[in-house]
Image (tube, rainbow, N blue to C red):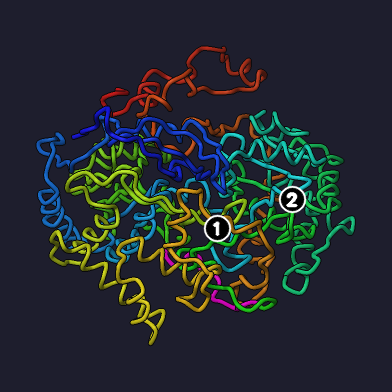
Amino acid sequence: MDSTTADTPITLHHRICPLCEACCGLTVQVQGRKVISIRGHDDDVFSAGYICPKGVALKDLHEDPDRLRTPMIKRNGRHVEATWEEAWAEIAQRLPAVQAAHGRDAVGLVAGNPSSHKIGLMLYLGRLIKALGSRNIFTAATLDQMPRHLSSGLLFGQWMSVPVPDIERCDFLLILGANPVVSNGSMWTVPNFKAKARALQARGGQMVVIDPRRTETAALADTHLFIRPGADVFLLLGMVHTLFAEGLVQLGRLAEWAQGLEQVREAVQPFTPEVVAPRCGIAADTVRGLARQLAQTPHASVYARIGTCTQHYGALNTWLVDLLNLLTGHLDEPGGAMFPKAAAFALNTSHLAATQPGQSLKGRGVALGRFSSRVSAAPEVMGELPIGCLAEEMETPGAGQIKALITVATNPVLSAPNGPRLSAALSQLDFMVSMDIYLNETTRHADVILPAPSPLEDLHYDVPYPQLSWRNHARYSAPVFGPAAEQAMDWETLLRLAAIASGEATTPATAAQLDDQLFAQDMQRRFGALAPAVLAATAGLRGPDRLLDVALRTGPYGDQFGQQPDGLTLAKVQASGPSGGIDLGPLQPRLPEMLMTPSGLIEMAPAALLADLPRALADLQQPTPELVIIGRRDARSNNSWMHNLPTLAKGPMRCTALVHPADAARLGLAEGRWCASAPARRRAHSTSTPRSA
């Protein structure tokens, strides 16, 4: 119960917003257990006071009466409140039974975007996946970003080696299929992008946006070029062709660290600007001009995102963007596309490649298609199957059919393709467990729902986003409030699920015991004879804090367990939190030290991608599609998953179709009228939460 009175002191807390990739610093004003206000933290070293509507919504989320605070068990078709031990007993009785009857692949797992914004989920989800031993693992990454990981893995040898624009020093920024004015970066963590773009223009730089729609970013750009939806691959191929044809290729210092140049030259020969122009709707001279400007501007970068990923040629598009940055001498150079250096070494394995300056480390690279989905034979990438295959894997009988499902912070009925089909498939499962804070379109099918703590009741350190950030930094948020009575932390819940999946008995002490056991094993494997010293140095910590301390100490800025006295430790980063974190400086060149390919070089001509070019060439001979439907992002709903909160749900209807006037006339569409059937409208707007029903 909130015992706040007028005499209760008001306190200020620094908080990193966990609701999107921008990771803005917030100042949360609190009285007792009540949030008084949330605003941007002016002294935050990364976001400098910027805030968007999602940050303010943390108050609504914490106080939302619809947010689940106790476990729920489905009884006679209805969810009823239960104790934690009742929930665990239900899971322990039913989940192993499915495994015993149908095999380990019969239990699937789906994880959503919030997992990457909660350190407990991010660091411990792998424990559960390993315990399950199932091939049926799905995440939201396959919905919009897997092509980005694929290109990074093939070219640089590690899935998370993602180059991002060094916008502070960039003088020409070319953006395709992205709207960072709204998203503040996607696979590029750049809060207050608008201000940074205007600063680029103020110093004489230019921003060019290529997009089928006049987005908020396009409106800010110096030049906006309309492109036919889905034709980015042809524009990019025409630009790469131009670089070779006009002698504009300049690898610079990376020439000795790259292989496959001649293979790329030969592969793009058929894609002249004249050949690709009709299909992409951009004149051949304009295609050449873009390539020339990119090559001739000393500090330039190409950035592409969801619009180029969520289409037939997502992998080719991302590869070609990387090639454009490399071929013009802008990869890993100030003002170009650079690789951030995350402080927490072990939390991001791309740093495992670091060796001595000027050297590369030959690695295993990445493996593709080690197994495939049962029904459609879709290959795995990063150990995951496409979430678009989830429904058919539940529907189709036979060995390996998904009979039980665990969902973690995800609502695929709303976010994945063909939600009604997926909803129907979920209703046929033998058993389903969800970790979630809401009863929503997906969790309504769960037999057991395990609630998570409010973000304000949990610690926060961004795991993936420092590896995607516009500037190097280290920031930590302590919990603003203690957890509610009996509320388990995310990592504790995952460990107890892992214990059950492994066939072990589970008690309230299971999570702590299993965490100690696994941590000791990991440290022994990693440090060998030094493991006892590591265990002693971290003896006062547990859970994510303990893993984070080791990661910071062994990272590129770390104290190396006392060998570098001025280096980072968890304690130093924690102490900096109220003042806005630790600024670790602008992006710096990192190649070749981080390469992990089998050759130790940038492998710029992967066979798997070259083999896809004939498909693109054949596509040029086909008629241009008459109508292509594409998605768009809105500032209030972008990556927030919070369609239950008034702060984000209020305002005009944003579920609207933007149609070219010529297409609207041809299809008989009129402004302000519905363009879907009544049943489809009901599906689009239905939700199981009380407030928005």
Hey, which residue is sitting farthest front in the picture?
7
Q: Which sits in the foreground, 8 or 344? A: 8
Point out the stretch of residues depicted in magenta. Answer: 360-371
Closer to the camera in the image, 186 or 141: 186
Label 1, residues with CA under 10 Å away: few <14, some 14-19, many ≥20: many
Q: Position of residue 655 (x, y in %)?
A: 48, 24
From the viewer's perspective, tell me whether residue 206 is left or right of residue 619. Answer: right
Could you tell me which residue is drawn at 63 percent across and 57 percent down?
A: 585
Q: In the figure, is residue 672 to the left or right of 664? A: left
Residue type beneath disc 2 = Arg
User: Which residue is depicted at the point 51% across and 69% down?
Assistant: 558
The front one of 688 and 230 is 688
SS at mark 1 in the image: helix
Q: Residue at x 16, y 63 (%)?
A: 509
Rendering coords of residue 450 (x, y %): 22, 46
Q: Secondary structure at mark 2?
A: loop
Q: Is residue 384 left or right of residue 255?
A: left
State the residue position of label 1: 467
Say the numbered circle drawn on residue 169.
Answer: 2
Quarter of image, res 333: bottom right
Is residue 170 at all visible to an observer of this figure?
A: yes
Identity, as a three-letter code, of the amino acid under mark 1: Gln
